Amino acid sequence: MSDDVLLDAAKKCVLAVGVRRTTLAEIARTAKVSRMTVYRRFPDVRSVLATLMTREFGGLLQGAAEPEVEPAHFREKLVQSSVAAVVALSGDPLFRTLLDLDPELVLPYIVERLGKTQRFAEGVILHLLQGGHEDGSIRKGDLPSQARTLLLLIQSFTFSFRPATADVNEKALMTEFAQVLDAALRP
């Protein structure tokens, strides 16, 4: 049995009852395995959920980094990927459930530390920035600082997307977001 079976079961549980009310016993029942099977792979429910979030959100970010239309240069690719990441994450049922039912679990990743998914996203941003420096489409600057700044900007749009679009058109907001990113990155 692969870990994906257990992670898929954990996802079903979280979508049904939220992160805080998901238990290893419920994950095992949903996966139709014994609790010992789950314990052999994951020491506790927190590690299952951390692995699930990394898999799910990392996959969404990876998909966002691969635009449907080939961009003219790295700046355009970075802008398109950033917009796609905000839309994908903010619309994801697992992400929405986490924010709706257990928002306090997100707070440490905003005010205390960066998690694996954030580090992954920052790595993608860094790669695109380097490409933009090389092709001349992105203004030169300190790469780690530029990457962290973009991560924080993209993250703020992702977490605030629902309230931000309550009375503002989603497409218009994303168009403005793209313009802000493009202007900030332009040499």
Image (cartoon, rainbow, N blue to C red):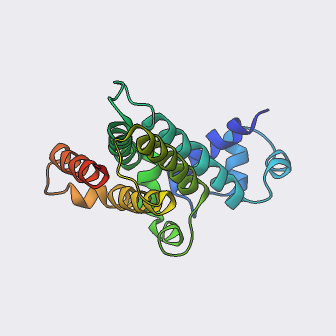
Looking at the image, which residue sits at the far top? 69
State whether residue 103 is above or below residue 85.
below
- Which quarter of the figure is the N terminus placed in? top right
Q: Position of residue 73 (x, y in %)?
A: 35, 33
Using residue 61 as the reference point, say whether residue 82 is left or right of it: left
Nearest the camera: 148 or 96? Answer: 148
Residue 116: quadrant of the picture: bottom right
Q: Position of residue 20 (x, y in %)?
A: 57, 64
Q: Position of residue 89 (x, y in %)?
A: 41, 47
Q: Position of residue 4 (x, y in %)?
A: 68, 36
Nearest the camera: 59 or 19? Answer: 59
Q: How many numbered circles does the render carry?
A: 0
Using residue 122 as the reference point, say whether residue 42 is left or right of it: right
Q: Write the residue at 29% across / 50% down.
A: 187
Looking at the image, which residue sits at the far bottom? 112
Nearest the camera: 56 or 174? Answer: 174
Nearest the camera: 15 or 169? Answer: 169
